[in-house]
Amino acid sequence: MRVLVLNSGSSSIKYQLFDMRERSLLAKGAAERIGEPGSRLVHGQRDSTGALHEEVTDSELPDHAAALDRIMSLLDDGAGAEDGGELIGIGHRVVHGGEEFRDPRVIDEPVIEAIRKLSPLAPLHNPANLLCIEVAMARRPDVPQVAVFDTAFHQSIPPHAYRYAVPEAWYQAHGVRRYGFHGTSHAYVANQAALQLGRPLRELNLIVLHLGNGASVTAIEKGKSVDTSMGLTPLEGLVMGTRPGDIDPGVLIYLARQRGMSVDEIDADLNGESGLEGLCGVSDLRDVLQREAAGDSRARLALEVYVYRIRKYIGAYTAALGQVDAIVFTAGVGENSPDIRERACEGLGALGVELDQTRNRARKRGSREIQREGAPVAVLVVPTNEELEIAEQALRCIHPGSQPAGDGPAPAGRNKMAF
């Protein structure tokens, strides 16, 4: 019972292969620089002892079809092949599902056409996702394929939270509203947090902080997303590695009208030159922390802006939920930076948020609680696994009676998100 998860970009295909009997990782890898000089494929595969062996091959990968052919060949010859493991499904990450998709969908022509029509809402992502879908369906027409949408988890957000106060025609004709992203991560982490707390998710109110190079925060009420920081695009909300998060839209009008910047120039700066990069010249939070420790004032300001925005959202979502059972940190920064967790929770004692410094800085893997004993609000660190969540959703879509894995250790070889 193998499920392959594919995550395609404009010049890359990342993949993971799972044995869904044990929810274990069999193989993973990435085809990089597809269609460019120096293309390569990094493939990792588990042996009988559970060790992951990675191999880097310089390959001619002129297009996504050639890359996927190479990936399929490695998987057919490797993990799972020796015991006759059957590929029962392929799960595809699709960034934008608009209002059309609230759940994963088995892919057919109407689904493909709907994803294509949504491409203007995610021009850098949906076309690449669609390209990989079409190639995979051509290569393996015998295998059911499922689209899992980043936006789907957030379709439970009520209109008062997802509507912008803009002309009605912007919404009706152009789809301008809050959609939210990182949905598969927020869904997975919410379920794991409930397992850690030993309580049903339907009884919990959670604030989940997905802090990586891209970052978002979601208010989850009794298992459902009721508000999230990213909006029509992944630019809104928290400060990120190269994206600014919340910004006055009048700034963009000013830059275009008074400074003569083109839409493309503004877009490039907002997506690639803003956030931590814009504030201090580097986008990796580890570098920012090192620079701050060395006395860099720009790095210190960047961190102050970064954590201040996080605290503002925690406060806002506490008000939106009315009562919070737990704050959950996940993704590369959230899982690996005790310093950022400490700063993000600083001064929130009035909300019931109190960290235990020893627990926060303990070098432990897996889900864990780091709040002070007896604190009213639990604070958790929960490793995310978006790929396993996509595999789970694909399996349940193909076989509706399938149940998600119970509480237990995460699959070995978890794909850590960029710090």
Image (spheres, grey):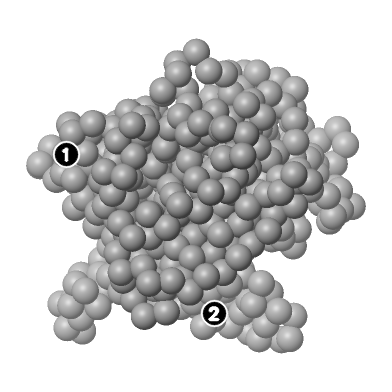
Per the model, the C-alpha gap separating discs 2 and 1 is 39 Å
Which residue is nearer to you in this view: 322 or 79? 79
Determine which residue is flagged by label 1: 113
Residue at left 21%, top 39%? 112
Q: Local crowd at mark 1 within 10 Å, few (<14), some, or many (≥20)?
A: few
Mark 2 lies on a secondary structure that is loop
Label of residue 225 in the image: none
Count of numbered badges drawn on the protein: 2
Residue 159, how many percent across, how many down? 30, 30
Determine which residue is flagged by label 2: 282
Furthest-top residue in view?
401
Which residue is nearer to you in this view: 367 or 79? 79
Quadrant of the rendering where the N terminus is positioned: top right
Q: Is residue 194 visible?
A: no
* In this view, 403 is above or below 293: above
Residue 363, how many percent across, how many down? 85, 55
Q: Nearer the viewer, mark 2 or mark 1?
A: 1
* In this view, 222 is above or below 152: above
Q: Local crowd at mark 2 within 10 Å, few (<14), some, or many (≥20)?
A: many
Q: Earlier in the sequence, mark 2 or mark 1?
A: 1
Badge 2 vs badge 1, beta-carbon distance below 8 Å: no
* In this view, 40 is above or below 209: below
* Amino acid under disc 2: Val
Place residue 84 in its image quadrant: top right
Q: Is residue 59 left or right of residue 313?
A: left
Residue 35, how many percent across, how many down? 31, 71
Q: Is residue 406 visible?
A: yes
